[in-house]
Image (cartoon, rainbow, N blue to C red):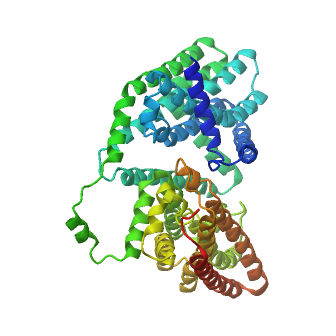
Amino acid sequence: MNGFALLCRVQVLALVNSLAPERQGSKRRSRTARLALAGVVAIALGALMAAYVALMGMGLVAMGLTEVIPAFALVVGSLAGIVFAFMKARGTLFGLADWDHVMSLPISRRAVVASRLGTVFLAAIVLSAVFMTPLFVVYFLHAPANPEPVIFAVLSIPLAPLAPVSASVFAAFGVTMLTVRFRHANLAYIVLALAFFTLIFVGAYALSFSAGTASDPAAKLAAFGSVASAMGAGLTALYPPAAWACEGIISGSALPFVVFAAFSFGVALACLEIMQRLYLPINGLLASKGGARDRYTAERLRERRSGTSPFRAMMNKEFRTLIGIPSYAFNCLFGYILMVVVAVALSAMGMRELLTSGVVDGVEITDEAVRAYASRLVVLIPWVYVFCTCMCPSAACSISLEGRSAWLMSTVPVPPRTVLGAKLAANALPAAITLAISAIVLVVSGEAGALQGLEIVVLGFGVFYLLITIALSVDAASPNFAWNTPNEVVKRSMPIMVTVFGGMAAAFGGGFACWMLMDTLGAAAGDALNLGLGVACAAAGHLVFRRLCHRTALFTR
């Protein structure tokens, strides 16, 4: 029992520390300060999400759909846990970097799996509490707050995610078992996951736009209400245990809720038992797959590399690294997809339809105002692409990602300019191509003129190039080679924050300045600002890169 408690403590501390990882050897005070800051940020984000969910609950009450709230709460709470469990299962339950060390511990396999699975359940329960508690508070402010329904609602918060999270773990297990049998398993996994996230993004926007096209606020509320009502009905029809929980919460009946609780615990225990039985096969398969390498003779290697320059070879290495680490790919590839999605959406929907739909400002405007605003919004489109390009910063942390193999790059007989240039080009080239494709789509569809298409490429690439070279300089000045998982440098490193938050500030600040300039001097002034600023940022980025190449001693810290 002491060993199991110790394992649980280690897993919880690892999960908490992943919110603000620190380098090995750092002082305790520094780690405590980072964790405290991460805790404050997490509490602020949780409060913001809770407030947003509470407003949604109030909207349901205003539409007379108070009884839908319990089912809606179960949907929201379960979805949060499902997504988290699916993303964390690989790396937490299976696919461990230290699998051989874990299995050599004098603890039963069931205890090892239970400690890791319990951490996933705990995180899902915390997320469910953030989303479900505000909805239940709103519900009981407008429904009879008898003791039995209140108790059942409180108990449903930890019970609701158990079965869905177990199903998500099984799904992650199945996907892993399927993809690991292919040579390019990571690439297939990344493509499918990005396609899934894109469908979610497009579906959410389509729902918002379809509700916004209603002619009056009452129609919009009715549209949202029908969706919420259908969601509640669909949940109770397709997932009967949720209907049992809702019946207990609404009517206070104990028997349906007891059945729901027994079902949730039963599925969770079954998940534990099945996973501990399959734990050795899946991890053994992943370990053997990860250690497999193609065998090349010296002659074959010479044939493959004949005519390939060091610069091109290093670029190919960066591309392989990007698609070889799923978290790295998810964090840096979605921006490319977002650029194309925005171009296709604007081309299919049209600027006039966007303005008259009510999505913008939620007010009706005249045809004359539509024409005036449309000419200005077209000039603001390049700033949207500034935001999108900064969502794909693969070069920002590329030096730190070398990790403990950084000595290889430090011993190659090429200058630092070649190494850094390959890392930068592997990010800048796809960004430029995607910007060009998006601009062509908008110009061909007639939603943007040739000048605005040029602005998309020049401004989007110029600001991106400046920010990515600054981030690369930050990473080169203080690389983190002692990371334990790629997430430490891919998601929470300073270079990534420089690029992402710098891009957000540039997009919103620059867009506001462009709008104010057009309001004073006309749309032509906005065009001139976009082109001039894009060229200036690209030139500044090139100067930053040249300084980086001359003053950086790679991989010596």
From where the camera sits, is residue 426 visible?
Answer: yes
Quadrant for the C terminus in the image: bottom right
The residue sitting at the top extreme is 255
Q: Is residue 441 left or right of residue 176?
A: right
Quadrant in which residue 447 is drawn:
bottom right
Residue 419: image location, x then y, percent: 48, 72
**Quick check: 466 above or below 491?**
below
Residue 361: image location, x then y, percent: 72, 62
Quadrant in which residue 461 is drawn:
bottom right
**Quick check: 489 above or below 173?**
below
Residue drawn at x 46%, y 75% is: 433
From where the camera sits, is residue 71 visible?
Answer: no
**Quick check: 409 above or below 535?**
above
Residue drawn at x 56%, y 18% is: 261
Q: Nearer the viewer, residue 478 or 227?
A: 478
Q: Total marks drawn?
A: 0
Q: Nearer the viewer, residue 454 or 354?
A: 454
Residue 382: image location, x then y, percent: 61, 75
